[in-house]
Image (tube, rainbow, N blue to C red):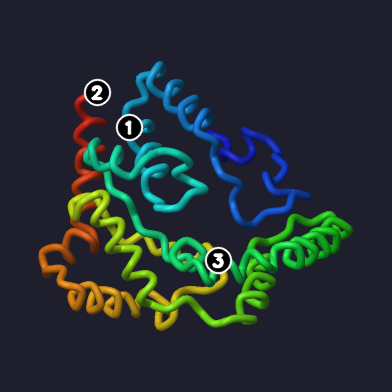
Amino acid sequence: MEQPITERRGHREPWNKGKLVGQKAPLKLKEIWAIRVRLELGRRIRDLALFNLAIDSKLRSCDLVKVRVRAIAKKDGVVMVNFFPAFIDEAWRSAWNEQRSERMTAYQALEAEFHAKKLPVPYFEFLKIDQTFARAFPRAPLSSLIDHFDHAIRVAGIDHVGFGTDFDGFATLPEGIDSASDLPKVSTALLERGHSEDDLRKLLGGNLLRVFGEVERLSKSNT
């Protein structure tokens, strides 16, 4: 009888044991290309397509580095708009950055507490700290998110933009957006800006399904 995978592989330490976890460090451009080259040399077409999709799916500086949105559109990719207020509203970002040293002090105290217990720090514990600090100033207005969509659409084109959201990745959302049930507010606001219902179908999943379809096609053609 085959052994369970966990028994065959043996004990492995949690990747985040004793480490400060939370907001991701940015990938450097040379790191992105190093991964891409390795996947290409290994003829891992499906993995390469999914990696490119992951890199291209966040319209934010920490993921895109210097990879241009227009280049993504040129390759028929899709940019998934992230709702994190620091990515869409300058006033909110400035207020958030002013708290950085205080947040880092709180993170380090939390890390020390769990390290003393020889336990990894759960992400939600860091999130609680972020939520406390985020309550110190007003939420970013919904209009900033809509401005962000408009900008992405102007740069990449309507066929290359989608809803990225990232609901579980940060402490707060734009005003009026508390869960996926509030997404119709974004759709309504985009319609009021002059976007058509066909545009909305593309933004709400049509563009992403097109890219995934191409990933599957390439995967099957190279097996």
Secondary structure of the residue carrying numbered label 2: loop
Identify the mark at residue 122; answer none if there is no mark: none
Mark yes or no: residue 158 visible: yes
In the image, is residue 134 above or below residue 203?
below
Left or right of residue 14: residue 186:
left
Rendered residue at 23%/59% (across/down): 205
Q: How far is the residue under mark 2 from the one under mark 1?
A: 9 Å
Left or right of residue 192: residue 45:
right
Q: How far is the residue under mark 3 from the one under mark 1?
A: 36 Å
- Tell me the kind of residue under disc 1: Arg
Picture coordinates of residue 119, whole percent (x, y): 79, 56
- The residue wearing badge 1 is 46
- The residue wearing badge 2 is 222
- The residue wearing badge 3 is 93
Foreground: disc 3 or disc 1:
3
Q: Is the residue under label 1 in contact with that under label 2 (CB below 8 Å)?
A: yes
Mark nearer the N terminus (2 vs 3): 3
Q: Is the residue under label 1 in contact with that under label 3 (CB below 8 Å)?
A: no
- Tell me the kind of residue under disc 2: Asn
